[in-house]
Image: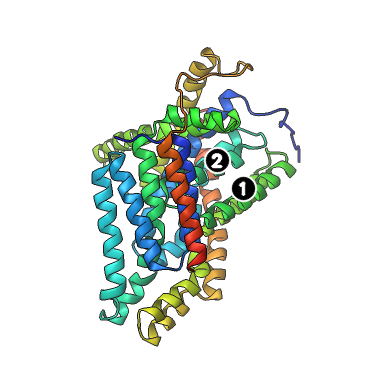
Amino acid sequence: MLKLDPRTCIILLVIANAVIFIQRNIAIEIIWVGLLLLLLCICGAVRSAVKLAAVFTACIVIQYFVFPVAPKSVVSIFFILISYARKVIPCLIVGTLTMKTVTVRELTAALLKWKVPYSLIIPLSVSIRYFPAIKEEIGYIRDAMKLRSIRFTDKFECTIVPIMMSATTTSDELSAAAVTRGIENPCKKTSIIDIRFGIADFVCIAVGVLFIALAVIFR
Amino acid sequence: MNVQRSSNGKMKGKELITVGIFSAIYFAINLVFMVLGGLHPIIWILMPAFIALFTGVPYMLLCAKVPKIGAIMLMGLITGIIYFATGTFTVVILVAFLLACILAEAIRYMTGFRSSVGNLLSYVAFSVGMIGSPLPIWLFRNDFLAQIKEQGIGEHYVQVLDDLATGKMLVIMIILTIVCAFIGAAVAKVLFRKHFEKAGIV
């Protein structure tokens, strides 16, 4: 299974965005999406790749075969949605790749190498780690609301207030723990994770750049 | 009005962590409406307004907890980066969001971070940044129109798109977002009085 450098994933994201913005040629778009899906398969996320491929195919089929014959009202509802979904898919593929193969620690190491300031890295990694906690908490709050049969109109208040309360305590506890481990130590921090570019990374970026060039030429 | 300047120095570890956690909450609320927006273009267009209505509480609490320059900037940056990394966003929203954050931060700085009017106005500015999400409907409009012609769909579909993507609709969207931001901030204020001040959090 191929393992890309986290930095390659970030660069590919930018490239994917650029290609989609520039290209006007459906052949380039399909080949580009196909290659990205292949990359996703090689990196081990076959199931997500199949799902995304299905969505992309559906978008194309709907746009070129269903819309010309569908009733006007249906088309008007879905036209923008489908067109936009098609535009977003390449980025979604690289995004899935990043989410499935890169851990928060590796991302931190990569950003450190790029000399991203600590004042951005710390909140970013805390944020990414905190999502599962929010999900868990909402589950508990929902259970508690069911027990007390809270009215629908009160639901927003009864959800947001406990979440904010616990967020406040968590941030206090977390900072106490982080300060103990030396987060405010002004010296340069090191990382145990060693990341470096390999041949695969260079190939990916080269292909990406090639596609930007193709998109510019055949627009 | 007693304007207190407490922006001495940069944010420390604790404040950075607070920003991280509140950004996560903001993002979670944001995401709910983003998914809902996928149902129909109209919901998508109204999405910035919905988000403005419901994210007032985390925004205002963050303003109260971290009265320093850069807090909102970081929150916007993190939201943008996560959306960008999951690939759901294009460059359009990143730019719109960045501009809104800079504006919100400037308002906060000028009003001294503690003023409730200043925070309210900065929240409005921040909320308007979300219009970057449906903005591609207008920006990609020629693309969409070209595609319609390419697929040989009749002229009346162009009309439908025209109806949706008018300048009038754009204005309505922005005004509605601003109004909802005011309501959202008011809701946050009520909740602050009712809960957070009693609990000693603010």
Please indicate whether residue A99 sits to the left or right of residue B104 in the image: left
**In the rendered image of this protein, does residue B42 appear above or below residue A196?**
below
* Badges 1 and 2, same chain: yes
- The amino acid type, in three-letter code, at marker 1 is Cys
Q: Position of residue B174 (x, y in %)?
A: 56, 64
For residue B75, the mark is 2
* Side of B113 relative to A106 (left or right): right
- Mark pair 1, 2: CA separation: 9 Å
**Do tag 1 and tag 2 residues touch (Cβ < 8 Å)?**
yes
Residue A177 seen anywhere in this rendered image of the structure: yes
Residue A186 position within the rendered picture, expressed as x and y whole percent measured from the top left = 64, 17
Q: Circle 1: is it few (<14), some (14-19), or many (20+) Cα within 10 Å?
A: many
The secondary structure type at the circle numbered 2 is helix
Q: What is the chain identity of the residue bearing mark 1?
A: B
Q: Residue at x 74, y 33 (%)?
A: B5
Q: Residue shown at 27%/55% (left/top)?
A: A53
Q: What residue is shown with label 1?
A: B101
Give the secondary structure at mark 1.
helix
Q: Quadrant of residue A44?
A: top left
Chain letter of disc 2 in the image: B
Quarter of the image with the N terminus of chain A is top left
Query: Could you say which disc has been placed on residue A70 in the image?
Result: none
